[in-house]
Amino acid sequence: MSQPAKLRLATVWLAGCSGCHMSFLDLDEWLIELAPRIEMVFSPIASDTKTYPEAVDVALVEGGVGNSDNLALIRQVRQRTRLLVSFGDCAITANVPGLRNPLAGPAAVLDRSYLDLADGSAQWPHAPGLVPELLERVLPVHELVPVDLFLPGCPPPAGRIRAVLEALLQGERPLMEGPEMIRFG
Amino acid sequence: MSVRTLRIDGRDVASADGATVLEAAGDAGVAIPTLCHLEGLSPVAACRLCLVEIEGSPRLQPACITPVSEGMVVHTATPRLREIRRTVIELLFTEGNHVCAVCVANGHCELQDRAVEVGMDHSRLPYRFPDRPVDLSHQRFGLDHNRCILCSRCVRVCDEVEGAHVWDVAWRGEHCRIIAGLDQPWGAVDACTDCGKCVMVCPTGALFHKGDSEGEKHEDPSRLAALLRARRARQEAP
Ligand code: SF4
Ligand code: SF4
Ligand code: SF4
Ligand code: FES
């Protein structure tokens, strides 16, 4: 039998603070062990590719779905990925970006951010096709597309990320149980 | 003291007449998850996390208010109960706004702990994101309705232990919430002695000390039970 192909890994950044990605970098020297075992096919921190590729094995998706770009990307990710992992609390619960959800829609948020709090030249960012429109609410990823695995934490501790990746690299499903693996916050 | 014998998860248990299934299970070393229950306060069965199956009864019963009876056969961890408990926790998370990452109770929260116990890695129910207020009118304490799970521990401790009866549960359904006084800002209620007992027993970050920031709420509700036990022992001493 031939050697199994390298795991085609992607990381995706939607409406999140990039803290989950920072936690990924906290894997420190284990990243050096990881590198030869994967092919990083898409990632805001490890690849220049702008288009989400086909036939991705595993995607770690950080962030909730908060604007039209996030929505288009997550649909594409779902179509082109075998195993979609909701990576961190924002992807799983909407978390901090979802703090705007109880407010009366995007207009209230934009008013507050760009008009009320502006020092001068108050105006909404308005560049159709360039600045993505906010969705009515920031939603957890699994409320829009099917998710295969949930990796909670804000951010998920590096050890938890490593445990998940190690299992996936061995072709196994990680056991998501107990405070080490599934605590929110 | 008459004794009742029953079976819990296949174990024979002897329990005092008048004890609850939760107490009998505890004595037998069977842990049933709870949230609204707190030793020293009257049980009210508000959260429904402690539901158990009792043979011969078609309905599930909350262990914290169900008295033991002779020959009772109790199951506390069937697949059906596990599924219900996880759903109860999902309901608690989705009906409010639980942003653990910025919560005073992050890491010291009984709701978080229960979520881990029932294996909740995500909610299968949609989040509601209700618009709920925060009351910062009290000099020393705050109340964030976003994190309140309506366990009514605060209501009971203030009434039954402090004797001030500042809190009540008002309204129904999605409007249900705790109120101070006659639905006044907490700080405007003269009956409040500022004792902090309600903050101490709150299982979540809903009641907190002003100025505490993320993860800084370190209340230990079991302290209250210890204080009450000590008080009772003193009263009963000759
Ligand atoms: S009370 Fe705070 S820490 Fe507990 S579940 Fe709610 S948001 Fe999370
Ligand atoms: S601080 Fe004390 S008196 Fe005031 S509401 Fe809380 S328990 Fe009641
Ligand atoms: S404020 Fe806390 S103690 Fe009171 S009902 Fe809400 S969750 Fe329970
Ligand atoms: S602990 Fe029994 S219903 Fe809440």
Image (cartoon, coloured by chain):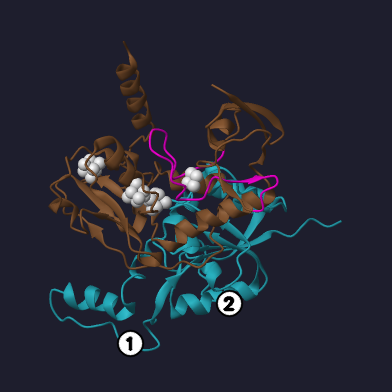
Chain colours: A cyan, B brown
**Mark 2 chain:** A
Which residue does the image show at 53% across and 70% down from the upper left?
A: A143
Badge 2 element:
helix
Residue position marked by numbered label 2 in the rendering: A76
Between B144 and B225, which is closer to the camera in this rendering? B225
Toward the right, the furthest residue is A1
Between B53 and B123, which is closer to the camera in this rendering? B53
Residue A170 locus on image (x, y percent):
71, 50
Magenta highlight range: B32-58
Toward the bottom, the furthest residue is A128
Q: Which mark is residue A127?
A: 1
**Sooner in the amino-acid sequence: mark 2 or mark 1:** 2
Q: Is residue A53 above or below residue B151?
A: below
Badge 1 element:
loop
Residue B31 locus on image (x, y percent):
57, 35
Toward the front, the furthest residue is B2
Residue B56 within the magenta-colored segment of the rendering: yes
Q: Is residue B22 left or right of residue B204?
A: right
